[in-house]
Image (tube, coloured by chain):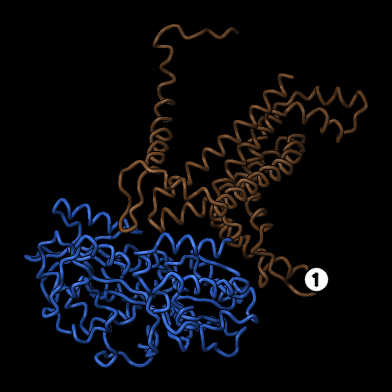
Chain colours: A blue, B brown
């Protein structure tokens, strides 16, 4: 979730022009008096703005259900608020956009009302990583938005695009990389496991994780910048000051389209796919409206609209989408993605964070 | 004029407002932070009310000790650099005509309006390989090829000194402007050079002001969290950076609070020690 909020800044600036244009074409997002309504929690900033402009009015037109969008605060504060409110039988929002880690944490207290797949027409077309399940197999959440973090390079410095994440380890790239500064948003442990250890299953045990940390430590001399603020890296990438690193695929594509000397590459091991779910608070009584909403959002046409207008990767199989190859390539790839091990960030978060901080700052 | 001791209850009323502000803006938030620092971290949620020492225990490691040590040294370094640069500068400034002084002060005030973010990004451009000052040196023939001067501890120090310097000058200015000019005149008539007069007369006369300024800049620099991130490597991240990571990114409020309490206590202890030494010297 943090990732999303943080990336709001630079995404807003890059995508801002497009959204502003789309906004003038779309209906104004006025809440009309309707019989049926639904409160939807969305990450504040860029996502809320573009959903209010491009997606929610269309939903109200199609279903007659009015949407009241609620801006979610940063961090896990929203999860905690929902949890406290549910204990008192209240739902500050019926449906919420929730990071994968928070979805898992909410499952521990049965915070999410199980969703009925029969009420979601395109359920069968959802990619497996976008169905979040309780241990008993019932459905806790369904993919809302997804995006890729890929290997990015400055085209003036690197005439040839790198093909593998292993380029980060290449001694020739000493002091040339910009990487995300937190264990829970860089997903570099997963990248290490997929590239050198045969897959993210290698992280199942603590020994495996420590081995990945050891391998990852070899990257350190190559890293010039560990960034929290995206603008910091994006600028340095464009100027060639820091010519390689990990960054958001969609934003890099837009910068390249603007004529900047940057490129985003899906390495052969896959790009990192991060995402958020739609979840329904157990305190909400609007179960039918919520299903109608999630059903609507999971349609191929709406997923296509979101890819074009909001810049998110589709949650459905490619076959059912009406995206052109260019539109698809702008937000996604056919190469199998590296899926973050969100379970680790719930069960071992403090330990991972401590090891990570010692690794990069030690 | 003799100062009367307060006689009635009404004489104390002027103290109520500052006292109230102190309670509202310092005592209450700080007490809350101390309380939270003893709460129990709940990795699946937020925290639960409790009284545990886990958060302090986790902090007592060589890793965090190293970070704390670096943060304190950096803040001390910034304080010393600032005072060493600002004191002679402010002294010379007070020797100039009134109009020139005003111009300088307005300029300094305008630097104050720059936020830490702008200062950080400006210096990161200035010290970069692609657009930085080394390009100028190459053009002048002083260097072979442009180099990046950041990330480094010197870049962090430069940025932080730049950030704190206007405050330092503005704190020193009133004391220097009020300095009795006859002190200097006496020194000069007795044959001291201007430099000697400055070092042997002006500096000792303003010793207390200098100590107070050092403490102020030290505390100011201790809270810096953006500049070390923008201009430094992870080894140069201050404790404030790690506190932010815990509070905002890990939702670990108890641990963040424990670190913050520790930082406040250490800096209060250092300030107290400095004042104690100062008082003993003055007495002797």
Query: Which is nearer the eye, B130 or A119?
Result: A119
Residue A250, can we see it? no
Q: Secondary structure under badge 1?
A: loop
Residue for point 58% across, 90% down: A160
> Looking at the rendering, in which quadrant would you find the C terminus of chain B?
top right
Residue for point 11% across, 70% down: A289
- Judge the density around disc 1: few (<14), some (14-19), many (≥20) Cα neighbours within 10 Å: few
Q: Chain of mark 1?
A: B
> In the displayed structure, would residue B26 be above or below residue B13?
below
Most extreme residue toward the left, as rendered? A35
Residue B93, can we see it? yes
Disc 1 designates what residue? B143
Q: Which quadrant holds residue B206?
A: top right
Query: Which is nearer the eye, B113 or B120?
Result: B120
Query: Which is nearer the eye, A94 or A126?
Result: A126
Count the marks.
1
């Amino acid at each position: 979730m943090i990732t999303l909020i943080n990336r709001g800044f630079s995404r807003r600036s890059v995508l801002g022009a497009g959204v502003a244009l789309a906004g003038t074409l779309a209906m104004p997002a006025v809440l009309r008096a309707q019989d049926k309504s639904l409160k939807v929690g969305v990450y504040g900033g860029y996502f809320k703005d573009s959903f209010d402009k491009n997606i929610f009015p269309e939903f109200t037109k199609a279903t007659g259900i009015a949407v009241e969008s609620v801006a979610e605060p940063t961090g896990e504060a929203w999860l905690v608020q929902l949890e406290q409110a549910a204990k008192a039988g209240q739902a500050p929002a019926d449906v919420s956009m929730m990071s994968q880690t928070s979805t898992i944490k909410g499952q521990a207290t049965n915070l999410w009302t199980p969703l009925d797949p029969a009420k979601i027409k395109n359920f069968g077309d959802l990619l497996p990583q976008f169905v979040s399940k309780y241990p008993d197999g019932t459905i806790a959440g369904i993919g809302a938005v997804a995006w890729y973090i890929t290997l990015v390079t400055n085209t003036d410095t690197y005439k040839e695009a790198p093909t593998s994440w292993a380029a980060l380890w290449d001694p020739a790239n000493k002091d040339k990389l910009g990487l995300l500064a937190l264990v829970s948003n860089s997903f570099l442990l997963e990248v290490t496991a997929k590239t050198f250890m045969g897959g993210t299953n290698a992280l199942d045990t603590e020994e495996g994780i420590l081995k990945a940390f050891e391998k990852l430590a070899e990257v350190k001399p190559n890293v010039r910048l560990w960034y929290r603020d995206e603008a910091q890296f994006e600028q340095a990438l464009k100027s060639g000051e820091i010519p390689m690193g990990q960054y958001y695929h969609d934003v890099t594509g837009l910068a390249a389209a603007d004529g900047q000397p940057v490129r985003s590459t899906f390495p052969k091991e896959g790009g990192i796919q991060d995402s958020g779910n739609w979840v329904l608070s157990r305190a909400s009584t609007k179960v039918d409206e919520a299903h109608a909403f999630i059903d609507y959002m999971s349609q191929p046409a709406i997923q296509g609209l979101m890819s074009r207008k909001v810049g998110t990767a589709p949650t459905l199989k490619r076959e059912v989408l009406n995206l052109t190859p260019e539109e698809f390539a702008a937000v996604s790839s056919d190469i199998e993605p590296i899926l973050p091990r969100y379970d680790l960030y719930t069960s071992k978060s403090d330990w991972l964070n401590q090891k990570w901080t010692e690794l990069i700052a030690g | 004029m003799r100062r009367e001791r307060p006689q009635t209850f009404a004489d104390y009323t002027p103290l109520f407002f500052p006292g109230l502000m102190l309670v509202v803006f310092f005592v209450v938030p700080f007490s809350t932070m101390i309380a939270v620092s003893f709460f129990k971290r709940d990795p699946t949620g937020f925290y639960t009310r409790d009284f545990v020492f886990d958060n302090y225990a986790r902090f007592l490691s060589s890793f965090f000790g190293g970070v704390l040590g670096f943060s304190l040294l950096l803040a001390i370094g910034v304080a010393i650099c600032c005072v060493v640069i600002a004191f002679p500068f402010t002294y010379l400034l007070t020797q100039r005509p009134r109009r020139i002084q005003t111009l300088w002060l307005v300029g300094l005030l305008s630097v104050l309006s720059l936020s830490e973010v702008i200062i950080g990004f400006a210096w990161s451009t200035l010290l970069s390989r692609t657009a930085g000052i080394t390009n100028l040196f190459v053009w002048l023939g002083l260097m072979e090829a442009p180099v990046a001067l950041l990330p480094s501890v010197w870049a962090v120090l430069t940025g932080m000194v730049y950030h704190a310097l206007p405050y330092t000058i503005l704190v020193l200015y009133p004391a220097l402007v009020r300095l009795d000019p006859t002190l200097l005149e006496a020194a000069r008539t007795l044959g001291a050079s201007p430099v000697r007069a400055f070092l042997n007369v002006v500096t000792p006369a303003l010793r207390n002001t200098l100590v107070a300024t050092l403490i102020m800049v030290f505390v100011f620099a201790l809270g810096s969290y953006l500049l070390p991130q923008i201009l430094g490597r992870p080894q140069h991240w201050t404790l404030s950076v790690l506190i932010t990571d815990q509070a905002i990114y890990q939702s670990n409020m108890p641990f963040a609070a424990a670190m913050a309490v520790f930082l406040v206590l250490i800096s209060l202890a250092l300030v107290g020690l400095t004042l104690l030494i100062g008082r003993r010297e003055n007495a002797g």
